[in-house]
Amino acid sequence: MKQICVIGVGYVGLVTAACFSDLGNRVIALDISEERIEGLKRNEMPIYEPGLEELVDRNVSAGRLSFTTSYPEAMEKTEFAFIAVGTPSGVDGEADLRHVAAVARTIAEYMRTPLIIINKSTVPVGTGDWLAEIVSSNQARPVPFSVVSCPEFLREGSAISDFMNPHRTVLGSLDPEAAEKVAQLHLPLRAPIMLTDLRTAEMIKYASNAFLATKISFINEIANICEELGADIKEVSVGMGYDKRIGPFFLDAGLGYGGSCFPKDVKALAYMAADKGRHPQLLNAVMDINNDRRPMVVSRLKEMIGELDGCTIGLLGLSFKPNTDDMRDSPSVDVAKSLQEQGAKVRAFDPVAMKVAAPLLPGVEMTPDPYSMAEGCDAVLVITDWNEFKHLDLERIRDLMKQPVLFDGRNIYEPEKLRSLGFNYRGFGRGYNDHMLDAEFEQDVVVAPA
Ligand code: UGA
């Protein structure tokens, strides 16, 4: 049983603490927020993450997991200190490292026994070296320590299963012995462990997120072209995904990426490049394409129903993706604001995010279920691809609406089916039918004889 301390009880920290305790370690999770820690002691989760409450409860009851706001208590016997605090975007897109620096200084003040400091927060390349300098220049007494970078690859909504079944563990350090010890902690996860240097590990995290964001912007660009040429993006994605070199994941066209990671990390990587005099042209294009998605939904809607002034528009989903109540950089906020600015009344339903969303969406009426949301609407927009939206009683929705207009920002429905139910339905890049609605072919289509 290893003694671990995890600093920061956000998504990454809390999941890391709960999972390491479940693997049989003794874990103390620390946060400077009294409110969060007091809540956790009552088994109240600060975030919605499927399975987390049960996991925390089980490990607290087994005496392997505890919570504190006290550094002296957390540092007392710990061998491994994981840093998992936020790194928000600064003004120009650079990562703001204030929280990481504060944690490093406080660790330095309270550490009493040799310590391996493992950074999980997504930090600019080079931060591991900087962290080591902060710790050594702030130590109350000269206790040996090493810094290891262990980037996280957890997706919100499936963070526990991602932790327990990783594709890989990446460990970066200039101290191979420390990296070996951290590798031992990860052995029960039975995934490949890659040992590398600090800066390379930090870059692997940024490059991974930037690549996934690139796939999303790529498929969104292809969706735009599909719209013009009459091809169906859903089938294009499937057809591409069979190629093992491409793979089927992260090829869902729609409203684009949001959340606390991709927008911030792509921006930060572009900033790092530009800061060193490089022109990050691909990353810039990825961001441009993504930024266009939100206004595009609103302009599409106007093509379907005309001016929005006086209309009532319903939003299906508010969170940036399903299975989370996270509203950070969610497309719903920009879309709702733009609709309101154009004189529309906006109503919304989300299975879990309405409480978190309400303060961010002034004037948006939250409704108890999708059906009351649809009542009297001039149009409904799908914002989040929650599974339960795929199984709605669409005939009931149609009958409740003032006019059956549906724009599907996540392509969760089949155009043929929705149109056969009498909906004026559009999605992103949905093929031949959409194309025929938009444009006349300029020349006759000649079908070659069989
Ligand atoms: C992402 C990465 O997937 C994790 O590996 C990483 O650890 C995490 O960021 C992080 O850096 O902490 P997450 O932001 O939770 O995880 O969500 P994803 O499931 O990756 O989705 C990100 C966004 O892309 C969502 O807005 C989603 O709707 C959008 N998306 C995803 C698409 O628009 N199309 C797709 O095909 C896939």
Image (cartoon, helix red, strand yellow):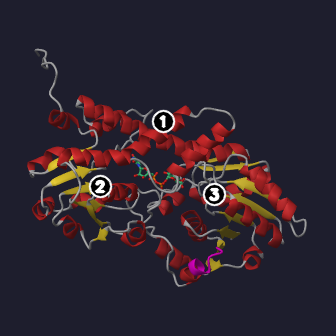
Residue interval drawn in magenta? 31-37
Of tags 2 and 3, which is closer to the observer?
2
Magenta region includes residue 34: yes
Q: Earlier along the polypeptide chain: callout 1 or callout 2?
A: 1
Q: Is residue 139 above or below residue 303?
A: below
Name the residue tied to disc 1: 285
Mark 3 element type: loop
Q: Is residue 345 above or below residue 278?
A: below
Under mark 3, the amino acid is Ser
Residue shown at 39% from the left, 73% from the top? 355
Name the residue tied to disc 3: 121
Name the residue tied to disc 2: 342
Tell me whether the residue at label 1 lies in contact with that at label 2, contact meaning CB atoms closer than 8 angstroms. no
Crowd band around label 2 with a 10 angstrom C-alpha radius: few (<14), some (14–19), many (20+): some
Under mark 2, the amino acid is Gln
Residue shown at 28% from the left, 60% from the top? 315
Of tags 3 and 1, which is closer to the observer?
1
